[in-house]
Amino acid sequence: MPDYDAFLLVSFGGPEGPADVMPFLENVTRGRGVPRDRLAEVARHYDLFGGVSPINQQCRDLLTAIGKDFAAAGLDLPLYWGNRNWHPYLADTVAQMAADGVHSAIAFVTSAYGSYSSCRQYLDDIEAARAQAGPGAPRIDKIRHFFNHPGFIGSVAQAAHAAIGQLPAGVANDAWLVFTAHSVPEAMAAASGPAGGLYPAQLVEAARLVAGELARAEGRERSWRLAYQSRSGPPSVPWLAPDIGGQLTELAASGAAAVVVIPVGFVSDHMEVVFDLDTEAAGLARRLGLPMVRAATPGTDPRFVSMITELVNERRGPLAQAPVLGSLPVAPDFCPNDCCRLPSARRAAGPGADR
C-alpha cells in the first residue's frame, strides 16, 4: 500500500466577494458557450449573499476538523486544499505540494457519488494539476465513493431527525421525506459507472439507507421520495427528474401534512443548498401552504469527519471488511480510465453554482 505523506481536500470552489462572482462563473462554464445574460442571472443568486458562496469557508472548517480528528487518531499528515474553479486552485496547491517535497498524497473530494461531474472530472483535474506541476508532482490517489459509508449515512439521518423536530407538533408525525441531489443530463447519468446508471442508483441507495436509519430511530417508517435540483442546462437537453419544485407541488396537492427536505447529494451547506433549497424551494412551499424544513448537510459533523479519517486509514492498510451499508458493494479504490466519460454531456451543462 502507498505510504502517504500528505492529505489533499479537493472541492469545487466558490466566490468570496462580489468582484469574484462573474470570473468564478466564467471558470465554471468555460468552453460551454453559456450566454453572458445567463451568467448574470446566476450571479444575482450570489448577490443575495453578498457575493459570497459558503463553500470555501465550509472547506476551511472541514479541514480544521479533519486536522483535529487526524491528531486524535495518531495520523500525522500535512493538510492541503485545492479547488477546481476558484482560489486556492488545485494546480497551485499541487505545485506547492511538490515544492514541499510531498511524494504521495491521499485526496478526499467533496462528493460522495460517481458521475462525470462528481468523480471523473475531479480525477481529470488532479491529473491536469500534476502535469502542470511537472516531474516532481506527487502521486495523488482519490478516496473511494462514500455514499453508503455508515459515517455519511448516520450523519445525514441524524440531521433529518433533528429537522423533523423543527416542524410543528401537529404535522411532524406525518411529514414526508424528500431527498434531493444535483440533477445532471440524462446522458451523463446513463454513462456513470462501468455499467452505466451508477449516479442515480447510488442516490436511491443512500436515500433508502437514510430513511431506514431514521425509521429505526423513530420506531416507524416514513414515506419518502428522491427529487433532483439545480438543473441549469437548456430545455432541449433532458436532465434527471423529478424536480424538487414539482415534487413539492405534487405533495401539497395530494394533501401532504409537511415535508422534510434532505439534501443527500451534498456534503455542505453551499450555494445550491442555501439558494436553491432555502430560498427557492422554501418560498414555493410557503406559497403552497406546505410546511417545510431542510435538514443540515454533514459539514463538520463528528461522524462525517471521523469517516474521512477511517477512509484514509482504509487506503493506508487493508481492512478485513471495509465499512459499508446496504446492498450495493464497496466502491473500488481506482476507477477505470474510461469510466463516466461523456464530454458531450459536459458541454450541454449550464452554469451550476458549486458542488
Image: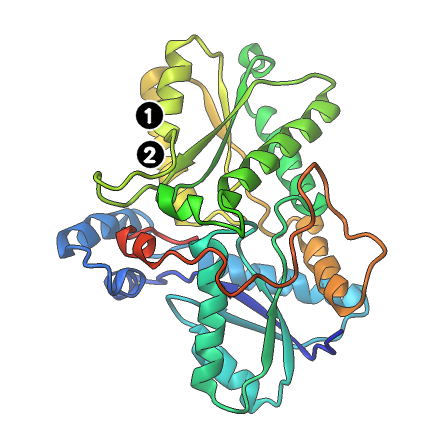
Question: Looking at the image, is 205 positioned above or below residue 26?
Answer: above
Along the horizontal axis of the image, is 61 left or right of 342?
right
Looking at the picture, how far across and down is residue 167, in whole percent? 54, 21
Residue 77 versus residue 185 in the image, above or below? below
Report the Cα–Cα distance between label 1 and label 2: 6 Å
* Relative side of 21 to 210, left or right: left
Residue closer to the observer: 209 or 202: 202
Residue underneath mark 1: 284
Residue 109, image x and y in percent? Answer: 55, 61
Q: Residue at x 52, y 91 (%)?
A: 135
In the rendered view, tell whether residue 4 sits above or below residue 41: below
Q: Is residue 128 visible?
A: yes
From where the camera sits, is residue 296 visible? no
Q: Is residue 127 above or below residue 288?
A: below
Q: Count the marks: how many? A: 2
Where residue 325 sits in the image (x, y, percent)?
72, 40
Residue at point 26% right, 65% down?
30
Label 2: which residue?
280
Q: Determine whether, in the image, residue 52 is placed left or right of residue 331.
A: left
Between 101 and 198, the residue placed more toward the observer is: 198
Q: Quadrant of the N terminus?
A: bottom right
Q: Position of residue 101 (x, y in %)?
A: 62, 90
Q: Secondary structure at mark 2?
A: helix
Instruction: Name the one closer to the observer, 240 or 256.
Output: 240
Instruction: Identify the secondary structure beneath mark 1.
Output: helix
Amino acid type at circle 2 is Glu
Q: Residue at x 35, y 62 (%)?
A: 15
Q: Which label belongs to residue 195?
A: none
Q: Amino acid at mark 1?
A: Leu
**Mark 1 Cα within 10 Å, few/some/many (few <14, many 20+)?**
some
- Badge 2 crowding class, 10 Å Cα cut-off, few under 14, some 14 to 19, many 20 or more, is some
CB contact under 8 Å: marks 1 and 2: yes
